[in-house]
Amino acid sequence: MSDSEDMTEFASIVERIERGEVPIKNIERELICPICKELFTHPLILPCQHSVCHKCVRELLMLNHEDSFDAGSECSLPGSPRSRVPSPSMERLDRLVRSGSISSPGWRRGSVTPRVTTIPCPGCHHDIDLGERGISMLFRNFTLESIVERYRQAARAAIAIMCNICKPPQQQEATKSCMDCKASYCNECFKLHHPWGTPKAQHEYVGPTTNFRPKVLMCPEHEMEKVNMYCEVCRRPVCHLCKLGGSHANHKVTSMSSAYKILKEKLAKSIHYLISKEDQVRTQITELELLINQTEENGQLAERHANEHFERLFETLQERKSEMLRSIEQSRNRRLDQLKGQVEEYQGMLENSGLVGYAQEVLKETDQSCFVQTAKQLHTRIQKATESLRTFHPSADPCFDEFVLDTSREETLLKEMCFGGVPDPPLIDLSRSRVYNEATICWRLSDDHLPTDHQILEYRRLGGPSQSPSQEDGEDSGVWRATDRVYGPSSVVCDLEPDSLYAFRVRSCRNSMFSPYSPEVTFHTPPAPAFGFLFSDKCGFSTERLVLNKRRDSVESVAGMAFLLAAERVQTGSYIGLDYIIGDAGISQGRHYWAFRVEPHSYLVKVGVASDSKLLEWFHNPRDTSSPRYDHDSGHDSGSEDTCYEISQPFTLLTLGMGKLFIPKASSSSSVSTASAASGDPGNRVLPMPNRVGVCLDYDAGRVYFYDADTMRCLYERQVDCSGTMYPAFGLMGSGKVHLEEFITAKRLTF
């Protein structure tokens, strides 16, 4: 389609929209209030641009005192009577509060007038503070009202709008609606109430409608002023008083005509784009419907398979259960028979019963041959009974320990049955991870909402300057090392080599199933072990212009009263000096590294090291290096003044400020990271300020290095006079703030 055809179609769509020829169908979901779930009635526009029924907002605010009711945005309708809507009952309000449907910081059960000015938007779920004036500050959405009215008329085309003047049963169907009188009339009543030659004859009338909107939208804050501008910050119409001295004084505003033109053009273009993509939308709807059918079918298939698997498990368990119960029953019957037989045997030992009674009868036999014939076998039985009486043992064990089951292993296996599939890999959080001679690696778990059992962190060394080529090709640099199981979102890896590149990755485990590895991330370890310290509030610390937090790991420069009084006496020039602060621990040997963060809004911050042999002299005899009377540059470029100045300084510092890092001029004792910066061009010596700055002091070699702590790229290095003890040093001027890294302060704070 050519540009001209495209513009012609675009203009046609705009005209159709303006004439109302776009059919109102299938839009009911856009016209439903998210609270009452009915068509909007007098919708109000919340500050978040979502619309809610007027009555719903009032119910949420729980303004049950009649005097506190107002007509909301009907202040845009001057002269109209304020509507009185009955307040919701206390029982309903109490039910709303208990159900958690509303945010009610000021509501107390039993209070007469709830003081609620904050409601949760049902669209975006953000808390909306309506302020002291409540819903009177909200605009009515007249456009939405008109669309709802057209939708109602389309839905009830057979139901006519009746004249408001005629009385039943002679009430006629309305033919006109007066927008000034806000009433509908039949032909006769309209002529009667709008006689020719009177001011009412000039009223604006339209076709029959129940939606009466004002001719001009008035400002809800200044009720007598028309809105004629659009605030781009608050995204709402405002009047000129709002801009001059109201809440929108410092906001960017545009004229209403310009905002109308821009927004209408954007909306029309968006509609044009959607209409032009109608075939694509229908294709995607077809694909989605196909996916819905596939999801339904696959879900049912998965249910059938799951039922089959569990049915087989149930059948197996049922078979084993039946077999075990059968064995228990057989063993029980056998033991009962044995014990019952033993009971009968012992009952026979009782007098006049059983064996004893029979023996007593045998003793009555007088015939010797007959007695002997019977007594021998009887005597043997009695001897056995006597022996069993002396050594009593039950014929069966009543315990069924052999049938006690230990199903803990099977239960564990059943509990570990995985239904969620393979977990998604976690992601290593670069903003929270820190690497020094120890690495603190943090990660974010996946959003599949299923808990994981644990994580495994792996790392390997990719190489470093101190590693020989044979080592880089060896086992140490290529083998992944794993930490123990980690049950939280972070882990610490110790004993990392300095000035080396390490790769890290992590994976999750759920029900013995491991996720894929996270994308590998690399960190460069500092060139030296981390040096721990806090800010010192002793040596040269200015309490008037520097503010330390309680942990002493953050310092901020502020303008104190003394600074203001001094500035009041200044007529010309600038007599402002740096305020210095040092660390509470010093360095007298070896290589040490520390890192910190400078707030981007800081005006001027200098960072580096300081020598204690010159600090006392400096603090007792400070020189105002920013004063016009102090100029160590005579005007020529020999560099002798700079050299003398540097020698006299106790500090070796790098300058940061206003989101920039300034590389000093290259001298015989310094070097910079790029040749362009070394050329001395001021533009090339200005770099973007790193998020984190690192400093490394090599005391034995007498050199200090400045790094981008995120990439470990050396930005600047120079020679430093390491006479005496060296301290981390910072200088601040104007608004500025420095935060020490947590790893740098951890040991000191723990101690």
Image (cartoon, grey):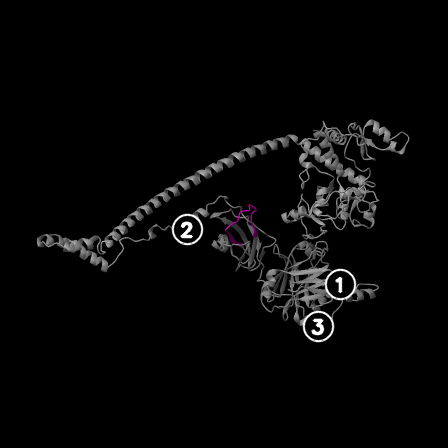
Residue lying farthest to the right in this orientation: 197
Q: Is residue 165 above or below residue 425?
A: above
Q: CA distance from mark 3 to mark 1?
A: 25 Å
Between disc 2 and disc 1, the foreground one is: 2
Figure quadrant of the C terminus: bottom right
> Residue tagged by mark 2?
408
Q: Which residues are magenta?
A: 443-462
Query: Is residue 445 rendered magenta in the image?
Result: yes
Query: Is residue 695 rendered magenta in the image?
Result: no
For image coordinates 81% across by 28% down, the residue present is 186
Identify the element where label 1 is drawn: loop
* Amino acid under disc 2: Ser
> Residue tagged by mark 3?
617
Left or right of 19, for residue 301: left
> Residue tagged by mark 1?
559
Q: Is residue 534 above or below residue 299?
A: below
